[in-house]
Image (cartoon, rainbow, N blue to C red):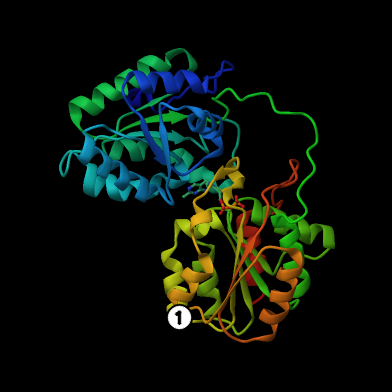
């Protein structure tokens, strides 16, 4: 399907797209530079990409940056790059597409591969995907980016058509992927034991150590889901937690906004991928120095919520960045004992605190999702003020 029939997309076909078929089609069109932010819809594709020597896969911290790097690569090589993303991050690409790549400005081609969460013709998705799922086709049309929904039977022709557009029009083109489209390798059914010090274990220690009236603002993905179910397991209600299910990277800024308006302790539970996505917020927080804010960064060196793709966090000294941004107290811990020790120290002081917690990736494969709607979560949370 292309954009001319965007209003009535067919539902996901039972036949699947082999990631290798898409990679072969891209290689035939001489696309070898790939970059982006992961998406669970694209998990099998990104895994195959990482194993294929014909391609390079550059990890981007956010989708806006990925488009800009693709632009730089094109300027230097005349070869368009492939930028992969979830449509949650599509909004971030509108800025560089409309003000840089557009045929009215620099005329830079780039091939977008977008996972279509919240596709209205697919099975219902999480609330945070509904709006973008509905409006993505019309947004693409509005900014002049033609698109095709990838179907298993027409991968070659879709990629060929897209690349013809890139060459002729010198502007972006999007390939859209519905959830469930890619064939996945059969999972190993054997239960693999989880490592001892995971995000969930760290969260448990954090809940035990911080005062009961601490307000928690947790980042997008499994951190929020685990915090929710730790509360369930402990039989405590959820009214002190805000589960930031959308707006990846925004939890720390939301936490700052809350901390400025209350005397209670606010604890932001961030992820390495999320913190990298909005690294500038550390500068804002460090400048403001709210003395009731604890910024915890759970660093598993990957985007675990979308399939465990590696992040660039191993080369980032997060406490060093926080210190340089003005956080007066920063620590890095990598074991349960050192976390408990640092939390003891942190809970005694009244100043802005930053704690990076290195954990092993891994979570319960059956991990559920919050049962309340985000609005109910917000109402309960607001009842605390
Ligand atoms: C703007 C945007 N881009 C991509 C996503 C898809 N996404 C959801 S959670 C997640 C991973 C978050 O990684 P991290 O913060 O390191 O936490 P982890 O999943 O490892 O706990 C991604 C990429 C998104 N929700 N929003």
Residue drawn at (83%, 58%) of the image: 233
Residue drawn at (60%, 85%) of the image: 263
In this rendered view, identify the residue nearer to me: 68 or 180.
68
Q: Residue furthest top?
A: 153
Q: In the visual, does 229 lie left or right of 166?
A: right
In this rendered view, identify the residue nearer to me: 105 or 205.
205
Count of all numbered marks drawn on residues in the image = 1
Q: Residue 306, percent across and down?
A: 58, 42
Q: Residue 384, percent across and down?
A: 67, 75
Q: Residue 189, percent across and down?
A: 77, 29
Residue drawn at (42%, 14%) of the image: 154
- Image quadrant assignment for residue 8: top left
Q: In the visual, does 156 lie left or right of 215?
A: left
- Image quadrant assignment for residue 3: top left
196 in relation to 263, above or below: above
In this rendered view, identify the residue nearer to me: 174 or 281.
281
Q: In the visual, does 246 lie left or right of 344?
A: left
Q: Residue 13, percent across and down?
A: 55, 18
Asked which secondary structure carries label 1, the reply is helix
Is residue 247 at least partly visible in the picture?
no
| Residue receiving disc 1 | 288
104 in relation to 257, above or below: above
Q: Quadrant of the C terminus?
A: bottom right
Residue drawn at (50%, 42%) of the image: 38
233 in relation to 33, above or below: below
Is residue 300 at least partly visible in the picture?
yes
Mark 1 Cα shell of 10 Å, populated few (<14), some (14-19), many (≥20): some
């Amino acid at each position: 399907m292309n954009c001319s029939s965007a209003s009535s997309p067919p539902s996901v076909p039972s036949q699947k797209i082999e990631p290798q078929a898409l990679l072969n089609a891209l290689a035939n069109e001489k696309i070898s530079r790939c970059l982006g932010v992961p998406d669970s819809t694209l998990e099998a594709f990104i895994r195959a990409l990482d194993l294929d020597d014909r391609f390079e896969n550059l990890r981007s911290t956010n989708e806006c940056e990925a488009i800009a790097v693709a632009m730089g690569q094109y300027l230097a090589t005349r070869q368009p790059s492939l930028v992969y993303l979830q449509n949650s991050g599509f909004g971030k690409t509108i800025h560089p597409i409309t003000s840089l790549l557009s045929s009215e400005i620099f005329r830079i081609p780039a091939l977008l591969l977008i996972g279509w969460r919240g596709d209205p013709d697919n099975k219902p998705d999480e609330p945070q995907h509904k709006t973008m799922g509905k409006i993505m086709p019309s947004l693409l049309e509005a900014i002049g980016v033609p698109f095709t929904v990838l179907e298993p039977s027409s991968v070659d022709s879709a990629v060929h058509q897209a690349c013809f557009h890139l060459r002729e029009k010198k502007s972006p083109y999007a390939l859209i992927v519905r959830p469930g489209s890619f064939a996945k390798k059969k999972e190993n059914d054997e239960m693999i034991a989880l490592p001892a010090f995971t995000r969930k274990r760290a969260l448990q220690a954090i809940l035990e150590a911080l005062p009961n009236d601490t307000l928690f603002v947790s980042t997008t993905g499994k951190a929020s889901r685990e915090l929710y179910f730790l509360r369930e397991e402990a039989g405590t209600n959820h009214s002190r937690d805000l589960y930031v299910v959308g707006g990846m990277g925004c939890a720390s800024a939301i936490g700052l906004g809350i901390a400025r308006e209350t005397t209670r302790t606010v604890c932001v539970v961030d992820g390495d991928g999320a913190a990298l996505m909005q690294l500038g917020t550390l500068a804002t927080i460090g400048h403001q120095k709210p003395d009731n804010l604890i910024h915890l960064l759970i660093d598993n060196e990957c985007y675990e919520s979308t399939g465990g793709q590696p992040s660039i966090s191993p080369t980032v000294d997060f406490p060093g960045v926080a210190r340089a941004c003005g956080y007066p107290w920063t620590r890095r811990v990598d074991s349960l004992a050192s976390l408990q020790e640092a939390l003891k120290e942190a809970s005694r002081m009244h100043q802005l605190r930053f704690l990076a917690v290195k954990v092993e990736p891994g979570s319960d494969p059956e991990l559920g999702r919050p049962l309340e709607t985000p609005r109910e979560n917000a109402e309960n949370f607001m009842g605390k003020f």
